[in-house]
Image (spheres, rainbow, N blue to C red):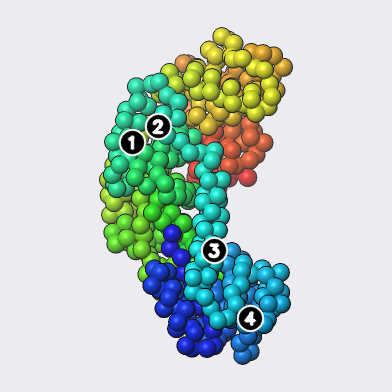
Amino acid sequence: MKITILVVDDELAQLDSIAGFLLKQKYDVLKADNPRKAIQLANENLVDIVLTDYKMPGMTGVELLAEIKKINPEVDVVVMTAFGSIESATEAMKLGASDYLTKPIDLQQLLNIVHKAVEHKQLVRENRQLREQLESRFRFDGIISQSSAMEQVLNLAGRVAPSTATVLVMGDTGTGKELVARAIHFASPRKDRPFVAVNCAALPENLLESELFGHEKGAFTGADRLRQGRFELAEGGTLFIDEIGEVPPSVQVKLLRVLQEKTFERLGGSKTMQANIRLVAATNRDLEQMVKDGTFRDDLYYRLNVVSIRIPPLRERREDIPPLLDSFVKRFAEDNDKAIQGVSREAMDLLVKYSYPGNVRELENIVQQAVVLSRNEMLSSADLPLHVREPVIEAAADDDFTQGSFTERVEGFEQSLIRQALKQTAGVQTRAAELLGMSERHLRYKLKKYGEK
């Protein structure tokens, strides 16, 4: 774990002595001989621990503590004070200091306090990562599947996992692209490092660059502090970029540079950072066609597409529906304290025949709703949503092909599907997009195209 320590002391001999000692312990060390310089360094660098003298010209260690905490609330501050000023150290502790040292400094005591602060920061960081990953830490044997199509997917993912190759996962929305990406990560040598995900379709274009690469304080309006991006947060681990097809051209250029040179800069910064990550990207769009259309860079596409994995939609692997149903029923019955034992034959038949435009995610939502509303020990067809019990007939056999051109008829059907999805989700565009198997941004484009609100 990389740790940066800022040492602040107006006595230059002691400043150099402490900084030199910590450098020998393999820590990254910054030095400031006055509080103003310390604040500047804290603004320009991600500091983990601050060792500050209590009594300095212009500002006390307690006042500096308050300023440093404004920049980074998670920094650990250790105050150094003269032996006869323990009350000053106690005051600092009340205001947020993690510990204190009395002068003259005992280097072994200093090292013990620094080790304790490092252990605390590591524990906080690990707990945060564990909380984020607790519900989604999957291995290949945790992916529910019995179809030959998915067995081929998992076989390919298992073979690529130990490598450093960039992986492009393709498939409709809701097919489980992130699930496969996590499985690749946890079967790789990077499994003990972070898995960090970012959904490009869920972020406005003007925020995506900052989210990926981070930003310096003052980089843009509202950037009131330095912020790490996903590339830094994924250090040593795997970065999963979902909906890569939604990335604008300006950000595509920067992603290409990261893949080529393994370096990047934060937004508004000039310091070059190393990108020690394994990249897995996913999309529900046809990137090859986007390359032909000039909306996606061909050089970035080939960098991403070192190994490609296509996840088939649920309608192409209906053998997976019964085991998925069984798993979802058990989970949601337990979550809702219901004694539901399974699914009736009639309900199973309807669920297996349904087309699932929203794929596995839609099946999961259908089961959750049915379990919540059911009053019986078996889920029946009456517990299922109306659109599952009475599926839309997509085209009549005796359709009148003289009415309108092919394009007009396809667009009319597309409009109809969009309206049905919006009606079913009470107008919530995010959920409607999931049902339709497209990104929310793509749905908004279609709504604008057809003049829908």
- Of residues 55 and 65, the one nearer the viewer is 55
Q: Which image quarter holds the C terminus?
A: top right
Please report whichever mark, 4 or 1, sits nearer to the chain's N-terminal start: 4
Q: Badge 3: how crowded within 10 Å, few (<14), some, or many (20+)?
A: many
Name the amino acid type tagged 3.
Answer: Ala
What amino acid is at disc 4? Phe
**Residue 140 got which mark?**
2
Q: Hey, which residue is sitting farthest bottom in the picture?
A: 57
Say whether disc 2 or disc 1 marks the residue closer to the N-terminus.
Answer: 2
Q: Quadrant of the N terminus?
A: bottom left
Calculate the distance from the C-alpha at mark 3 to the C-alpha at mark 2: 37 Å
Residue that mark 3 sits on:
117
What is the CA distance from the residue labelled 3 to the residue labelled 1?
39 Å
Residue 207 in view: no
Residue in the picture at 28% in, 44% down = 163
From the image, state whether disc 3 or disc 1 is nearer to you.
Answer: 3
Give the mark count.
4
Instruction: Name the secondary structure under disc 3.
Output: helix
Q: Which mark is residue 157?
A: 1
Label 1 SS: helix
Residue 97 shows up from this direction: yes
| Labels 3 and 2: the sequence-earlier one | 3
Q: Which kind of residue does numbered mark 2 sit on?
A: Phe
Tell me, yes or no, whether the two marked residues, 2 and 1, touch with CB atoms within 8 Å.
yes
Asked which quadrant contains residue 385, the reply is: top right
Residue at position x 40%, y 51% in the image: 237
Could you tell me how far apart the alpha carbons at marks 2 and 1 are, in whole angstroms?
Answer: 9 Å
Q: CA distance from mark 4 to mark 1?
A: 61 Å
